[in-house]
């Protein structure tokens, strides 16, 4: 069984295996090939962006791609195929369905140190995911130092859900994360959530809200709002966004906009127009949760991230279509299948259940991103993302436990052609578990999969 995860576009297996020996192509060091190379790498092939061709025969092992990301993706495939320094004879032609293949980590509800974030980057790069969305601010914590606003971290980062410590990244820490990610062809998408989810900022600077509030350690949502009609709010946003844009080489800046239940409708629309306008002036493409689609004044190209269910409720689909109508695109993250913080069946140890949970591996696999909202098909989709909120999670081991193996299913939705059978997926997943073991990635040994021991 040589099944690859995510499932490649085409794979034709031959007979036998080929030992990997010594000779190495000029690019192998650069891309961190597994030990014992013998793989000839070449750039400039006719592959699609991010795609690759891997040909293993008795004569040669060649990996060809049009770009370095493609070679990197091919090497992730080689890692899965390698057993005892040998590769099976095969030919794989592969390329991604979507350009944006993401994971999100909430470092606001519980702070995670730099080395936990870089471990997660390693984990997701293995799945050919190429964006990490960092949810940097929320009611419980402001996790990035901003020059000129010292209390954001002195007070705003002093705690987390359940109390105990908190923490934040200096801008140098953030730059280290960005650089680590870039070496693995992962783009960081930073999120500053507003106008709701802002209790931490307001606890530091009461003038940004409706007056003094205490740091928050609970898990309610929808109770905080920036002061919408105060110019001081927009001076603050300008400072934050300007500094963040300067240390973010990727094209995207996520401005949140979800669950602003303490902001009136008029105020919300006024705020979204002002805040997105500021961010666009710093040259970034705006991403927002789909609620910001209520605005008809979004900057060109604004991306909506859909978080409601695979069967949309009420006006959630409509708000998402608004991004398309305004010339933008959509990232699919339906909470009932793609939210990695939902409980698993048969273990209530961690996680929430509000999004029609518990969520099984089968749930995470059996849906198609182009079939959620009428009018949002492959053409309108930028991609797919698996968010992980950390109200109930405080270590990287717990994060990995909730993510794996469901994130593998979501990665396959993002990379592989539509279709694919659940039985075939879990058979490949069982083999993939051995690589997770070898790389010390924690995962839930769900009984849905016949793991190989
Ligand atoms: C909803 S859906 C949230 C987060 C919570 C999460 C918990 C959305 C954009 N926001 O604030 O952490 O549920 O599952």
Image (spheres, rainbow, N blue to C red):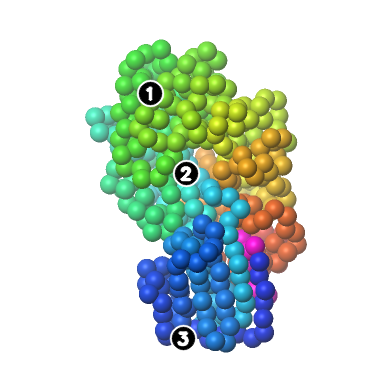
Disc 3 vs disc 1: which is toward the camera?
3
Q: Position of residue 322 (x, y in %)?
A: 60, 27
Badge 3 residue CB within 8 Å of ligand 1: no
Marks 2 and 1, Cα distance to the nearest angstrom? 23 Å
Badge 3 or badge 2: first in the primary sequence? 3
Residue 310 or residue 449, whichever sits in front: 310
- Name the dominant secondary structure of the magenta segment: loop
Residue, disc 3: 21
Residue, disc 1: 202
Q: Is 102 colored magenta in this rendering?
A: no
Q: Based on the displayed image, in which of its 4 quarters is residue 206 positioned?
A: top left
Q: Based on the displayed image, in which of its 4 quarters is residue 2 positioned?
A: bottom right
**Region in magenta:** 1-9
Badge 2 or badge 1: first in the primary sequence? 2
Badge 3 or badge 1: first in the primary sequence? 3
> Which quadrant is the N terminus positioned in?
bottom right
Say if 431 sits above or below 83 in the image: above
**Label 3 residue SS:** loop
Residue, disc 2: 133
Instruction: Count the marks.
Output: 3
- Res. 243 visible in picture: yes
**Label 2 residue SS:** strand
Please report the residue visible at 51 percent of the width from the left and 57 percent of the height from the top: 49
Disc 2 vs disc 1: which is toward the camera?
2
Q: Which mark is residue 139?
A: none
> How would you rate the neighbour count of disc 2 (Cα within 10 Å): few for under 14, some for 14-19, many for 20 or more?
many
């Amino acid at each position: 069984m040589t099944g690859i995860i995510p499932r490649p576009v085409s794979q034709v297996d031959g007979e036998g295996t080929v030992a990997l020996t010594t000779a190495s192509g000029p690019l192998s060091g650069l891309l961190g090939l597994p030990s014992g190379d013998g793989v000839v790498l070449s750039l400039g092939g006719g592959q699609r962006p991010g795609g690759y061709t891997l040909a293993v025969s008795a004569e040669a092992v060649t990996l060809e791609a049009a770009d370095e990301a493609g070679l990197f993706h091919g090497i992730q495939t080689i890692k899965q195929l390698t057993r005892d320094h040998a590769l099976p004879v095969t030919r794989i032609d592969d390329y991604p369905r979507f350009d944006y293949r993401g994971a999100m980590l909430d470092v606001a509800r519980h702070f995670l140190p730099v080395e936990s974030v870089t471990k997660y980057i390693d984990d997701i790069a293995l799945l050919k995911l190429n964006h990490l969305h960092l949810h940097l601010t929320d009611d419980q914590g402001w996790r990035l130092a901003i020059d000129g606003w010292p209390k954001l971290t002195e007070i705003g980062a002093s705690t987390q859900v359940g109390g105990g410590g908190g923490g934040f990244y200096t801008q140098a820490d953030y730059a280290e994360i960005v650089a680590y990610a870039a070496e693995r062809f992962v783009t960081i998408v930073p999120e500053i959530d507003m106008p709701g989810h802002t209790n931490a900022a307001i606890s530091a600077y009461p003038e940004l809200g409706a007056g003094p509030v205490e740091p928050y350690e609970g898990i309610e949502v929808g109770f905080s709002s920036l002061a919408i009609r105060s110019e001081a709010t927009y001076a603050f946003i300008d400072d934050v966004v300007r500094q963040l844009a300067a240390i973010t080489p990727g094209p995207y800046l996520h401005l949140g906009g979800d669950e602003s239940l303490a902001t009136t409708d008029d105020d919300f629309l006024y705020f979204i127009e002002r805040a997105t306008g500021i961010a666009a002036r710093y040259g970034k493409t705006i991403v927002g949760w789909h609620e910001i689609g209520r605005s008809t004044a979004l900057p060109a190209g604004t991306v909506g991230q859909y978080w409601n269910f695979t069967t949309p409720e009420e006006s959630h689909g409509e708000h998402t279509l608004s991004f398309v109508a305004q010339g933008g695109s959509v990232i699919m993250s339906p909470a009932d299948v793609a939210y990695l913080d939902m409980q698993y069946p048969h273990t209530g140890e961690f996680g929430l259940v509000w999004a029609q949970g518990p969520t099984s591996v089968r749930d995470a696999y059996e849906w198609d991103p182009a079939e959620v909202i009428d009018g949002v098909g492959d053409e309108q989709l930028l991609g797919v993302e698996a968010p992980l909120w950390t109200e109930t999670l405080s270590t990287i081991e717990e994060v990995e436990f909730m993510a794996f193996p469901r994130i593998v299913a979501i990665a396959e939705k993002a990379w592989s052609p539509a279709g694919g059978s659940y039985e075939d997926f879990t058979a490949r997943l069982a083999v993939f578990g051995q690589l997770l073991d070898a790389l010390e990635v924690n995962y839930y040994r769900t009984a849905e999969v016949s793991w190989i021991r």
